[in-house]
Image (cartoon, grey):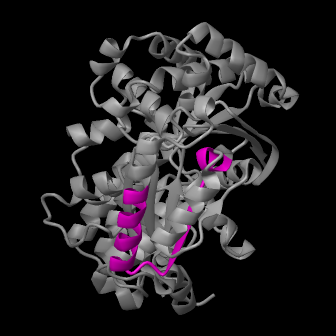
């Protein structure tokens, strides 16, 4: 594929136009608008209203009257917003509460009249499938069990080898559970355990990962981050060992409302349901015994989009696609990332497959800070990556990417911002990131960040020396600053440096 074809492919999602999803759940109604429909489309807009449609559904069999008023108002606003924002395609989907309520069909009719669009009521199997697809879109290597917790149901789906396996939808959402158990935690525990006992395939999870989806469970992850002073406040792909999650869940499940109110950053509208969400997580982990819990910000809505992609696009690496798109949008020359990747290959000849993938992403991000003030390029680029919409990468990989670009802009390794990223890495990973960044700094200096130069030059370690070779036609690109940049890479590798001219 040519550079022009590659660039056209990577911007195809933007050319198609904005797409949106309205998700009508048991507890909330949410609109998310995406910039295009490619492999990892950026979220342009995200708003939710906690309506509580499923409140008292277990006892009345009907949608909550106050929740209906709130949901209709939210839907009217979200459809109007979508039109104003130029959304080309808007999906409106409803899940457990509308699916199970006696007046669910009436709601669908009224909601359709308000929106002028069809309302798709997902079956339990569809809800489980799309949730798993959303996780796989962001974590392609996911191997274990996806649990998507809504207000009225808990979907459980086995995933592995890029596909979906055994699945079940259960009536174990916090709203429904707290009503059925009438506030009795012991009774709630019994209900949960009896339901999970009917799923013998949960035994397949032992020693694998549990992927937790849903706002209530992400709230627990946020509490844990604060509790342990975790340096990277990124909820997606946050990983906690099973025992630690169970300890936290048991504490939260037994806290009073007054105690929950004192937890910083916790939404007041989650105070009633969070203990039941925590109890659910604890009992699932007890029954299935995974090795750890990975929290995913991607679920049903992203799964809807991902499921519609052609197989070729589904197979693309989301990290590389995002890095290429960001590099093309924020850098000077889109094609320079591929050239930098080829030029630095010999310097990292012993890297493994995952390190090579990480270096490729870093190469495409190596020019994203050029527009910033020179004094702040390093820090701005660091935070752009630490907090950016990257998927297909864990927190350690994210931190390495950020440190590499921080070093590319000569960031101070002792600064607080840098320590925030390095805190989740070991010394080898930190060194690898710094070598990448300093080699990028050398490459951009040597070429003036212009394509077509590095292709004719080489950088590698030979016989214990770091050797930069320049063809005769580029010999005048050598200079004092280039030598300083080369020496910086040499110091990190503990190698003397040499510049040679070739024919």
Relative vertical location of residue 446 with respect to residue 136 in this rendering, above or below = below
Residue under the image location 67 percent in, 44 percent down = 100
Q: Position of residue 416 (x, y in %)?
A: 21, 37
| Residue at 50%, 71% in the rendered image | 113
In the figure, residue 283 lies in which quadrant? top right
Quarter of image, res 223: top left
Number of numbered tags placed on the structure image: 0
Q: Is residue 285 left or right of residue 185?
A: right
Q: Residue 301 at what x, y percent from top left?
A: 56, 58
Q: 72 or 270: nearer the eye?
A: 72
In the image, is residue 185 above or below residue 414?
above
Q: Quadrant of the N terminus?
A: bottom right
Residue at the outermost right position = 200
Q: Along the horizontal axis of the image, is 225 left or right of 186?
A: left
Residue at coordinates 52% horizontally, 79% vertically from top-left?
A: 13
Q: Is residue 278 visible?
A: yes
**Is residue 84 within the magenta segment?**
yes
> In the image, 195: left or right of 224?
right
Q: Nearer the viewer, residue 493 or 80?
A: 80
Percent of width and height locating residue 257 = 35, 16
> Considering only vertical position in the picture, is 118 above or below 359?
below
In this view, 67 is above or below 21: above
Answer whether residue 40 is visible to the viewer in this image: no
Residue at left offset 32%, top offset 68%: 368
State which region is magenta.
Answer: 72-99
Is most of the magenta stretch helix, strand or loop?
helix
In the displayed structure image, the side of residue 237 where residue 437 appears, left or right: left
Q: Dividing the picture into quarters, in which one does residue 480 lie?
A: bottom left
**Is 496 covered by the magenta stretch?**
no
Q: What is the x, y in percent for residue 182?
A: 56, 16
């Amino acid at each position: 594929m040519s550079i022009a074809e590659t660039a056209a492919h990577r911007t195809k999602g933007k050319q198609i136009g904005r797409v949106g999803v309205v998700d009508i759940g048991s507890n909330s109604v949410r609109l998310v608008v995406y910039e295009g429909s490619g492999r990892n489309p950026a979220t342009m807009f995200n708003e939710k209203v906690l309506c509580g449609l499923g409140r008292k559904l277990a006892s009345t069999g009907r949608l909550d009257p106050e929740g209906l008023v709130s949901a209709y108002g939210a839907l009217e606003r979200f459809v109007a917003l979508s039109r104003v924002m130029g959304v080309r395609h808007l999906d409106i989907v409803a899940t457990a509460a509308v699916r199970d309520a006696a007046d669910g069909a009436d709601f669908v009719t009224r909601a359709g009249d308000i929106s002028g669009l069809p309302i798709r009521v997902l079956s339990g199997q569809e809800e489980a499938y799309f949730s798993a697809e959303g996780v796989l879109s962001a974590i392609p290597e996911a191997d274990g069990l996806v649990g998507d917790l809504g207000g009225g149901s808990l979907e459980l789906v086995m995933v592995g080898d890029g596909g979906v396996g055994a699945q079940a939808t259960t009536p174990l959402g916090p709203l429904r559970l707290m009503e059925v158990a009438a506030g009795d935690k012991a009774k709630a525990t019994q209900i949960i355990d009896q339901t999970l006992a009917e799923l013998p395939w949960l035994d397949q999870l032992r020693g694998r990962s549990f992927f937790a989806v849903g706002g209530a469970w992400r709230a627990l992850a946020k509490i844990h981050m604060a509790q342990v002073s975790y340096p990277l406040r990124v909820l997606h792909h946050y990983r906690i060992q099973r025992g630690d999650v169970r300890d936290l869940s048991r504490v939260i499940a037994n806290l009073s409302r007054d105690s929950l109110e004192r937890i910083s950053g916790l939404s007041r509208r989650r105070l009633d349901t969070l203990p039941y969400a925590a109890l659910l997580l604890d009992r699932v982990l007890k029954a299935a015994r995974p090795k750890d819990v990975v929290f995913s910000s991607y679920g049903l809505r992203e799964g809807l989009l991902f499921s519609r992609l052609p197989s070729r696009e589904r197979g693309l690496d989301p990290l590389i696609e995002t890095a290429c798109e960001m590099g093309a949008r924020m850098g000077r020359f889109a094609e320079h990332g591929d050239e930098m990747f080829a030029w630095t290959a010999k310097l990292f000849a012993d890297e493994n497959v995952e390190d090579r993938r990480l270096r490729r992403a870093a190469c495409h991000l190596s020019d994203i800070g050029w527009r910033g003030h020179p004094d702040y390029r390093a820090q701005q680029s660091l935070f752009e990556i630490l907090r950016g919409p990257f998927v297909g990468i864990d927190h350690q990989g994210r931190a390495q990417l950020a440190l590499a670009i921080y070093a590319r802009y000569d960031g101070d390794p002792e600064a607080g911002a840098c320590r925030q990223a390095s805190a989740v890495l070991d010394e080898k990973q930190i060194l690898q990131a710094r070598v990448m960044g300093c080699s990028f700094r050398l490459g951009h200096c040597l070429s003036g960040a212009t394509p077509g130069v590095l292709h004719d030059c080489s950088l590698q370690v030979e016989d214990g020396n770091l050797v930069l070779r320049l063809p005769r036609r580029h010999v005048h690109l050598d200079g004092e600053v280039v030598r300083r940049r080369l020496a910086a890479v040499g110091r990190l590798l503990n190698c003397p440096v040499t510049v040679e001219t070739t024919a």
